[in-house]
Each structure stands twice: as C-alpha cells, then as structure tokens.
Amino acid sequence: MKLTLRFALFAFAAVLSVPLSAAEETAPRLLVIKAAHVVDPVSGTILPAQAIVIENDKVRSIGPVASVAVPAGAKVIDLGDATVLPGLIDCHTHVTGQPENFYEDIFRKSPVDQATTSHLYAKRTLTAGFTTIRNVGADNYVDFALRNAINAGKLAGPRILASGPALSATGGHGDLNGMSPYVRFEGDINGIANGVDEVRKKVRENIKYGADVIKILATAGVLSEEESVGGPQYTLEEMKAAVDEAAMWGRKVAAHAHGTEGIKLAIKAGVASIEHASFIDDEGIALAKQHGSYLVPDIYNDDYILAEYSRMGYPDKIIAKEKLVGRTQRENFTKAVKAGAKIAYGTDSGVYPHGWNGKQFRHMVKWGMTPMQAIQSATTSAADLLGWKDRVGEIAPGYYADLIAVKGDPLADITILEHVAFVMKGGEIYRNELTADPVKQFE
Ligand code: ARG
C-alpha cells in the first residue's frame, strides 16, 4: 500500500514538472519606480531623483533617474515628489491576535478564532509599511500557518519570521497564571519547558513544525499574572541549552527580558536579542555591546496599555506592573542609545492594534535617536538581527522589491512614517495613494 501511494505521488509530481516550451514561459515582469527622494539607510543619506528597476520580485538596479535606462517593455510608476524607503521591519510582533477583553479572550476564544482572524492583522501590518516582521510568540502554531499562506500567495501579509510558542518556565510569563489549578486548555500547544532536556526538546519540536527563530522568556513579564515583572525565570544553563540547540538547527534566539539580572544571563547565554530590556543597567548595556546582542525595546506600548487595558478588564496587578516598567524602560533606552548599543525596531504589536506599528518611531526620536537612526533600526539593523541582511532592509540589486513611500520628509518629521502612502512587497503593490496603479487583489 505504502509503495503504491509513493508511486502515485511520484507520477503526479512528474506530470507537474513537465517543462514549459519557451513560448509558454512568461517574460519577466519589469517595473521602474521613480521617486524624487530615496532614503538610503546604508549611507544614512537621502538620494535625490532615483529610478529603481524591478524584475519580478527583486530589485535589478537603482540609480539616478538620468543614468538609468528604462528597459524595453517595463512599466513606469512615477511616485513624483514622494520619499521612498526600504520596506520597514518590526522585529517583535504578535500578529496572530490582539486583545479585546481579558477574560473573553482567554475563555470564549480558541486557537481557531486566532487562526481565522490573523490574516486581517497581517494585512494591516503590511499596508502600514511593514513588509517584514519577526513574530516572537504564538501558541498552537497559528503563526506558521499564517506565514505559509502568505508565502503561498493566498493572503496579503508581510514576510514573517515565526517562532511558534515561546519557551517558558512553569509559572512563568508564558504560562497561564492566577487561575484555579483545575483550569486546563485541552490540547493547547504551548512552550512550557523546564530544565535543559525539556528546553532542548521544545526547541526541536518548534523547529520540527516550522520555527524560523526561537523565543525564550528569560524573565517575568507585564501582561501575565506572576508576582514579579523582572525576576529571572530561566537559569543560565537552560538558556545556554536553548541557544546551543537552536544554533545546531541554524536558528537564532530572541529573549524576552525586563529584569536586570535576567538580561545579563540571557546575553551571557548568547541570545541574539534582548526584547524589552526595561531594567537594563550600565553593565547590561556594556555586556550587550561586547556580545553584539541587539536590544529590541518596545517603547510605544506603555501609552496604549495605560490608556486601554483597565477598560478591557485586565487585572489591577497587571496595570501596576506596567507602571513599574514604562518610564524606566524609556530612560534606559536613552542610555543604551547614548552608549551606542545595537538597537532593532520592535514594537510588541498585538499588545496594541496591528497596523499602528509606526507609532514607535516618534518615541525613539523623542528618547534619543536621530530620525535616521530610528529608520536604520527598522531597516538595516533589523535585517541584520533577522539574519536577512542579504534580502531585506535596503533597496539594492538582488534584494526583494520591498519598498514604501511617504508624502514629505521623514527626517524632518518622523511621524510621517505613521501614514505610509504606498507599499510594495516583492514587486506587488499593496497600498497606493499616490498613483492610479491598482493594488494586488486576492480572491
Ligand atoms: N509583552 C510584554 C510583557 O507582557 C509587554 C510589555 C509592555 N510594556 C512595556 N513598557 N514595554 O511583558
């Protein structure tokens, strides 16, 4: 039986791979984008009057309009006086969900609800100008399914580097705390893992089902009911095991860490990035620099949590934890910027509504970055953290044709990045308020 099935599959594959004749092959899709200003995060400058030649989903060349020949058969899209930037990258998202009500989200919804709505959030993220995201934490593998459907061209969404369930200690930030011991969610696929052996096994399991990156919860958190907001929750040994196992499979590790001590342990264990980094001290900043670890500080969402979470029924305990974190995190962000630590843009979208990802730029500038540094954090630096430096984060030959355009100069007013007017991902238009060219349609 097994053999017959294998043969049938083989025969089917053979039919599928019959080569097309030369005439049947489609010619490359050629496009030229012209723009009066292009932000180049590599040189840290704005290039005037550029033409970008795009072949299928990649950039073929870029140069001054006067020196670029429009290839025969190419369609030209002139974005006029707009400013073009590489597609933005958010290194910390939770695109599969968004809070509506604390108890209803937990008890009246299931992973199926997440799976059926996450495409809306993916589209909002993309059309806000974020053409790539690193999704760090989603139970039940909803993120893998979403990523796969986007990659297959079935849905509009950003490129997704997905982690699956975040590894958490029992009672830690990724566990459901504060409930009766009899409350269980049958069949829940989560990231609970204790001790080096379980940690290694969970890393393997996540990778088996589709993880591109591993997320670990190194310390306590805000939006969870354990006592502390920054207490360490994994030992150095457990985190080393996670990093070592992930590396064996060619994956990097992102560590959620608010607490001073847990941040240092995670850096010493070799994680690629410290998420939140709220209570990082001078020693932690120096360690991050020494190890080349990125910091991914989500310094917008304090505003949203304090404004909306009580209304959504979040326990006072959680609101009180946010009050401990918010301002200090921003002050420590300023210190890290001054010290020259590596910082990548990550917002924790899903804590606030998807599509608002650009709101963090103004905070990064207010708390110490230049507008160009903030843009670099969401392009070149983010691409470096993701391990995708060769494909996203710049507009250059061989890179994905992921680019956005805004009306005005984001270096003069960074809030312009909250209102992106044009979005292209892989040579397809997903938002266009600048020309009459249509956006890509899905059934
Ligand atoms: N997911 C994070 C946590 O629960 C959110 C922290 C939000 N607050 C902040 N100030 N960044 O720990």
Image (cartoon, grey):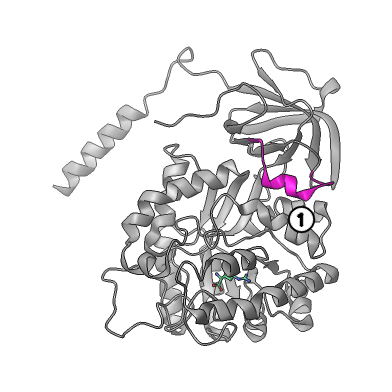
318 is higher (above) or lower (below) than 47: below
Residue 216 picture location, percent across and down: 52, 73
* Residue stretch in magenta: 410-422
Q: Secondary structure at mark 1?
A: helix
Residue 346 picture location, percent across and down: 64, 60
Q: Going 64% across and 81% down the picture, which residue do you hit?
A: 324
Q: Going 30% across and 27% down the picture, which residue do you hit?
A: 15
Q: Check disc 1 and report the residue beneath it.
A: 374
Q: Residue furthest left?
A: 1
Asked whether residue 253 is in view, the answer is no
Q: Residue furthest front?
A: 311
Residue 329 within the segment the image draws in magenta: no
Residue 126 picture location, percent across and down: 56, 44
12 is higher (above) or lower (below) than 365: above
Asked whether residue 97 is in view, the answer is yes
Q: Going 41% across and 44% down the picture, which residue do you hit?
A: 149
